[in-house]
Amino acid sequence: MTTRMLVLGGYGTAGAMLARLLLERSDAEVVLAGRTAAKADALAAELGAEFGARRCSARCVDAADSRALDDALTGIDLVVVASSTLDYVRTVAEAALRAGADYYDVQLSVRAKFEVLESLRSRMEREGRCFITDGGIHPGLSAAMIRALLPAFGRLERADCSGLMRVDWNAFAFSTSTIHELVDEFRDYRIEALRDGVWGKVPSRQMQRTIDFGPPWGRQACSLMFLEELPRLAQTLPTLRECGFYVSGFGPVVDYFILPLGMVALKVAPDRLGPGYARLLSRALKATSRPPYETVFQVEAEGIAAEPGGARRLAGLRVAHEDGYHLTAAAAAACLLQYLDGSIRRPGLSLQALAVEPGRFLADLQTMGATVSVRGAPELAAR
Ligand SMILES: NC(=O)c1ccc[n+]([C@@H]2O[C@H](COP(=O)([O-])OP(=O)(O)OC[C@H]3O[C@@H](n4cnc5c(N)ncnc54)[C@H](OP(=O)(O)O)[C@@H]3O)[C@@H](O)[C@H]2O)c1
């Protein structure tokens, strides 16, 4: 049966790319939704002309309005949240449950989102609804990459993940709420990693590392950053002793001037200074973004090889694309393709990076234009 999905933020940067990929690669019907009817209509007309008007339509809906959501979700099988609506996670998730729809989001991995979704977990299980959260690449990719390397190890001991996101910020027009959410993410910033087999806080003097992202980037200064998918994965891998995610910054001006300023401003008076700071950050990102552009995610893994009497092994996996937004949409589409054919559709709450079958996920990313390369584990590269 054809799946009908409503994409909240369906004409936003990530949502529009995701909608196109899903129309190209599945037979799903897509409803593009958001608060601006003209934008939803224009994109639905464009995609409808290409993929058939029956498969693509528009709907004006505000994620803050539960009644409007109830109307919009009638007859919908899956709600895809690609909107900057973290303030309304409960409103949207409860509307999905009322409508008997499944749920998938590419929103930032913040504590408040998990608190809401975890509080609804038993209802999801009872009512047979599949909720997949933390989709996309950041979050969404790192733990899946570790899982893809697992068959190469009999005993995986270390998995260091890193990400470099050099995005042409001038190419996109973001909603104010999207920039506010980015600012909120800094408020939620946690310096945590797995050290000696225990997940916890890392002293701030140990949060910096330089990591080689390959040409043209070379070694880049990176900071440790919490990703919900990593401690959850670590819990399932008792041999793992070291694991963390290191993110490369936005560039010296933003990293050393704008971000520290924001940390102070948001600590002192988040509500009063937050909106002004969001404008400043948006301007600074646009003013300082320079080519080349590329988004790179890497895992370096170490342990004992899988073969009998296995030797010590160092293996790596790298995923890259020149357009970080395309990579985000491709990762979301690759996950949803597994959802759509039923292979990962399970009642309850799961995270994309822990739900997907990682080999197929990476292969699909490759067919959507990503470069995927394996180092030190030829048997995986040959698959
Ligand atoms: N996981 C990842 O890898 C990853 C990567 C990039 C982005 N993201 C996340 O994806 C989300 C979208 O990012 P983006 O860069 O695509 O943002 P964007 O281009 O600014 O698009 C945001 C979309 O959300 C819609 N929206 C905002 N408030 C809404 C509301 N109250 N009700 C309904 N729709 C609303 C906007 O439409 P209207 O304003 O017209 O309503 C717009 O279509 C954000 O949460 C962002 O943090 C995740």
Image (cartoon, grey):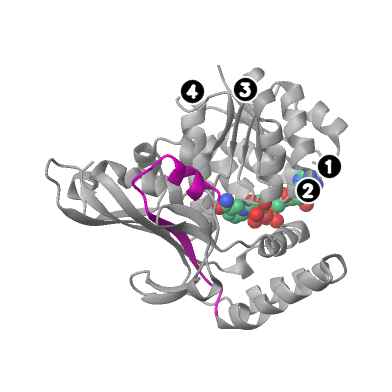
What x and y, as percent, mark residue 191?
A: 56, 64
Judge: label 2 CB < 8 Å from ligand 1.
yes
Q: Is residue 236 magenta?
A: yes
Quadrant of the image containing the N terminus: top right
Q: Quadrant of residue 170?
A: bottom right
Which residue is tagged 4? 342
Q: Is residue 289 magenta?
A: no
Among the two numbered marks 4 and 3 on one chain, the one whose residue lies closer to the N terminus = 3
Helix, strand or loop for disc 1: loop
2 and 1 marks in contact (CB < 8 Å): yes
**Mark 2 or 3, closer to the camera:** 3
Q: Alpha-carbon neighbours of circle 2 within 10 Å: few (<14), some, or many (≥20)?
A: some
Judge: label 1 CB < 8 Å from ligand 1.
yes
Q: CA distance from mark 2 to mark 1?
A: 8 Å
In magenta, the rendered stretch is 228-251
Q: CA distance from mark 1 to mark 4?
A: 30 Å
Which residue is tagged 2? 87
What x and y, as percent, mark residue 229?
A: 51, 47
Helix, strand or loop for disc 4: loop
Which residue is tagged 1? 64
1 and 4 marks in contact (CB < 8 Å): no
Q: Residue at x 78, y 75 (%)?
A: 265
Q: CA distance from mark 4 to mark 3?
A: 16 Å
Among the two numbered marks 1 and 3 on one chain, the one whose residue lies closer to the N terminus = 1
Q: Say the numbered circle drawn on residue 358.
A: none
Q: Amino acid at mark 4?
A: Gly
2 and 3 marks in contact (CB < 8 Å): no
Which residue is tagged 3? 125
Q: Amino acid at mark 2?
A: Asp
